């Protein structure tokens, strides 16, 4: 938050405000000069809201979401680290999404393009004594969340090994996109890819269709995708563009009716209004030697479509 610069740079950049939610957990609100906004909770380092300049919410959050520890919030952009899903000995999706992060007042610099003209916040997670008992690896996880003048939302994760031995992890930005109706959307950019199907004991299949559409539960990890995936929402006439770097895989998830009904934090029929499509590193865990750092970026934007 160490923002300085001329008055005109300041107004281009937008505003950064720290508030508290009703449980006393800090949230950071980013705003650009056109009125778009992003809300990030220090609980989980989780983006909870992303609104365009017309005030429309672009991320889904369940009406039954639970916003206090120890449950992770159902919606927005949970961060799955150091484990995605149940692929390891840790709790589902690792512990980062239900830890309280801190604001990093003096982060190592990023490229100027990641800062200039943007409203942003830097967060930091370090393992607690308890975390080290279940995952004995010292790390620093720095998360930059930024909102650009054109409304693009970018998340940059930098994970550094500050241990004296290597460690490996899997990772996902578990982005919940807000959609009009699951039967009205299609995903392009995953055609012909192999995927691991979580509904079939993680068996590997090859995507056959031209574009991915939905008529039942889907829980897959698409492998080694290109860095751009598009989610077309026909009814709302808009397309989400998901751009990723350093993240080879894409998790696609919609629980459909039966599974969502079994979850305490999912509202009735709400599965229709959400689709998780993201950037992830799942099949091949990332290994960091002592002193090494990994960077994984996700950029979300929305364009009108017919
Ligand atoms: O309920 P959660 O722990 O947040 O997980 C929600 C979903 O996350 C991923 O997409 C997994 O592949 C799914 O199997 C899981 O149901």
Image (cartoon, rainbow, N blue to C red):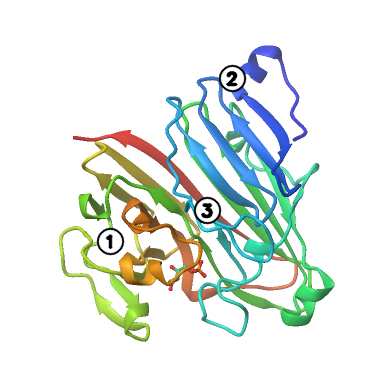
Residue nearest the viewer, comparing 177 with 260:
260
The answer to which of marks 2 and 3 sits earlier in the sequence is 2
Label 1: how many residues lie within 10 Å, few (<14), some (14-19) or many (20+)?
many
- The quarter in which the N terminus is drawn is top right
Q: Which mark is residue 77?
A: 3
Q: Which mark is residue 119?
A: none
Q: Position of residue 250 (x, y in %)?
A: 39, 63
Q: From what the image shows, is residue 31 above or below residue 202?
A: above
Q: Which label lies toward us, 2 or 3?
A: 3
Label 2: how many residues lie within 10 Å, few (<14), some (14-19) or many (20+)?
some
Residue nearest the viewer, comparing 225 with 41:
41
Q: Could you tell me which residue is drawn at 61 percent across and 24 percent down?
A: 13
Q: State yes or no: Cβ of the residue under disc 3 lies below 8 Å from any atom of ligand 1.
A: no
Q: Seen from this angle, which residue lies furthest front?
A: 268
Q: From what the image shows, is residue 190 above or below residue 236?
A: below
Q: Seen from this angle, which residue lies furthest right?
A: 129
Q: How much space separates mark 2 and mark 3, taking CA atoms?
A: 25 Å
Residue 141 falls in image quadrant:
bottom right
Residue under label 1, please give it.
Answer: 190
Residue under label 2, please give it.
Answer: 12
Q: How much space separates mark 1 and mark 3, taking CA atoms?
A: 21 Å
Q: From what the image shows, is residue 202 above or below residue 240?
A: below
Q: Could you tell me which residue is drawn at 21 percent across and 54 percent down?
A: 183
Whether residues under marks 2 and 3 lie with C-beta atoms below 8 angstroms apart, the answer is no
Residue 262 falls in image quadrant:
bottom left
Q: Which label lies toward us, 1 or 3?
A: 3
């Amino acid at each position: 938050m160490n923002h300085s610069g001329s008055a005109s740079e300041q107004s281009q950049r937008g505003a950064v405000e720290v508030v508290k939610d009703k449980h006393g957990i800090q949230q950071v609100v980013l705003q650009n000069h056109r009125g778009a906004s992003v809300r990030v909770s220090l609980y989980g380092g989780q983006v909870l809201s992303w609104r365009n300049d017309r005030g429309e919410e672009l991320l889904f959050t369940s009406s039954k979401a639970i916003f206090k520890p120890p449950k992770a919030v159902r919606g927005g952009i949970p961060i799955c680290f150091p484990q995605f899903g149940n692929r390891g000995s840790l709790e589902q999706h690792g512990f980062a999404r239900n830890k309280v992060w801190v604001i990093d007042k003096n982060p190592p610099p990023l490229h100027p393009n990641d800062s200039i003209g943007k409203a942003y916040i830097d967060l930091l997670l370090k393992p607690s004594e308890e975390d080290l008992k279940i995952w004995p690896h010292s790390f620093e996880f720095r998360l930059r969340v930024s909102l650009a003048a054109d409304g693009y939302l970018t998340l940059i994760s930098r994970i550094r090994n500050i241990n004296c031995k290597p460690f490996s992890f899997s990772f996902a930005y578990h982005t919940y996109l807000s959609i009009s109706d699951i039967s009205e959307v299609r995903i392009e950019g995953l055609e012909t890819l192999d995927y691991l199907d979580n509904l079939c004991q993680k068996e590997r299949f090859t995507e056959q269709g031209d574009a991915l559409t939905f008529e039942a539960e889907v829980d897959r990890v698409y492998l080694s995708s290109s860095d751009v995936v598009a989610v077309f929402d026909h009814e709302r006439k808009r397309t989400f563009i998901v751009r990723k770097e350093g993240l080879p895989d894409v998790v696609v998830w919609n629980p459909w009716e039966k599974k969502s009904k079994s979850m305490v934090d999912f509202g009735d029929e709400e599965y229709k209004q959400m689709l998780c499509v993201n950037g992830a590193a799942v099949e091949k865990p990332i290994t960091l030697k002592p002193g090494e750092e990994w960077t994984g970026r996700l950029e979300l934007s929305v364009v009108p479509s017919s």
